[in-house]
Amino acid sequence: MQHAPPSHDAPPPPEAPGLASWLPLPEALRQRMALPKSSTVDIPGYHGPATVVAFPQLARDPLRFFQETAQNFGDLAWIRIGTERIVLVSSPEHLDSLLWGQHAKLEKDAITQRLRMALGEGLLTSEGEKWKSHRRRIAPSFQRQDLARYAATMQDCADRSLASLTPGASLDLRTVTSALTLDIVHRCLFGSDVAVPVDRIGHALERMMGAFLLELRSWRRFVPESLPLDTRREVQSALKDVDAVLHDIIRDRRDHPRPAGERHDLLARLMEARDDDGQAFTDDELRDEAITFFIAGHETTALALTYAITALSWNPEARQRLQEEVDALPADTPIDLQVARSLPYLRAVILETLRLYPPAWGFGRQATETVTLGDHEIPAGCALFAIPWSLHRDPRFFDNPTVFSPERWLDGLEKRLPRGAYMPFGAGPRTCVGQHFAMLELIISLATWVRHFDIDVDPAHDLDLQPSVTLRPGGPIPATVRRR
């Protein structure tokens, strides 16, 4: 019997009158707050006076807010927050139409665009022809033959990380997973011979993420980006630490290029890449992509590994089954692409972890022209939100959705699900270019750790999940280590 993790789920929809009836405002004020008549008004949601309660609820608990909004209002829900017009999209059918069928009418939403203050014009934040050109040059570095090269580096990093797991000791699980994934992204991106102060970069990224959380869940969200708020000053200060490191490495690599035929790291591949016109990445573009890889390749994978270890601790039967699968490998067999494909239960554990605890918990797109979803036309300027956290816990697609059960993935569920019901790496043409890199990294890291240790987290521990740019625990996760 698998155990459910502490739940953030919303209660069943109330059988009470509509939200507007909760706010008995004067009729004159009610009319001033009402939206002008448009094709979007017939989408149920936070209209008129009900918009007053939307942001406080969102700021207090975004996960509950979006899940409850979908339950109360259906597959399309209208949310008005200040000047922001948002449509929450909660059905695979609509998401398929939106993210695959109408992606040319979309750009990244305003929240993602704010990340440009830190990430610049990297693959995550760029648009149009610039994004297409960068994607074409970057994608070959994540093809199968390159993943095989990265696997050996990942295994070496995972083996070295075992020294940080001292039997009988207590540790902060998030700290040790972050150290491992920082080491992996460092060595795959820059190579093993480049000295990178990963602790310094890791601390700077933590500061940036904390500042973004405050930015998104307080009054700062509505302040023009040009004003120097404390959170924005914090981001700029942290960026100076990261930029000093990245620009030094890029300049040194320009001055000392890798010899022909030498095994290349990702940075070397990016420096060699050319677009259709023979154009190479500039130093600033390399910096933007490098910091994007640091955040996307370190932060999200560290979180997924943290949640996988925690869920296995809370579900000892699943952990035992995983250990039996890994123990069946010949002793000290390194995990490469071929071995990774022979571990179906390990892959199922990762898929289930990404279902219950998707690090990329929500994302948005901005309509640049009218988008049609079913019978509704969404005008240009509206944001359209997809929330994997809610979709992955929807009982229409997942039985016992709050229960950690890797077994659900062993009978072909992944192929049966409608497109758009499971999106841990996003969807459409802008699906994460590094998703196969991340899956291999998780498989190698998790297999290496469970081979040697049991890592236990108190089942009463509250993860206090904080949905910032990623889905992060609210504090340290104390864990104890036992050698198997």
Image (spheres, rainbow, N blue to C red):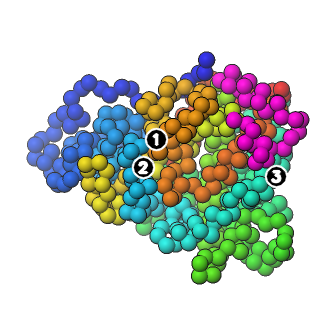
Depth check: 483 or 264 in front?
Answer: 264
Tell me the element at label 3.
Answer: helix
Looking at the rendered structure, the kind of residue marked 1 is: Pro
Depth check: 63 or 478 in front?
Answer: 63
Looking at the rendered structure, the kind of residue marked 3 is: Ala
Q: Residue at x 61, y 48 (%)?
A: 300
Q: Which label is found at residue 418? A: 1
Q: CA distance from mark 2 to mark 3?
A: 36 Å
Q: Residue at x 56, y 64 (%)?
A: 123
Q: Nearer the viewer, mark 3 or mark 1?
A: 1
Tell me the element at label 2.
Answer: helix
Looking at the rendered structure, the kind of residue marked 2 is: Asp
Region rendered in magenta: 315-344
Q: If the image is split into quadrants, where does the C terminus sit? A: top right
Tell me the element at label 1.
Answer: loop
Q: CA distance from mark 3 to mark 1?
A: 35 Å
Q: CA distance from mark 2 to mark 1?
A: 9 Å
Q: Are marks 2 and 1 in contact (CB under 8 Å)?
A: yes
Residue to which mark 3 is pinned: 152
**Residue at the extreme right:** 331
Q: Is residue 105 magenta?
A: no
Q: Earlier in the sequence, mark 3 or mark 1?
A: 3
Residue 465 showing in the rendered view: no
x then y, percent, for residue 140:
66, 64
Q: If the image is split into quadrants, where does the N terminus sit? A: top right
x then y, percent, for residue 238:
61, 60
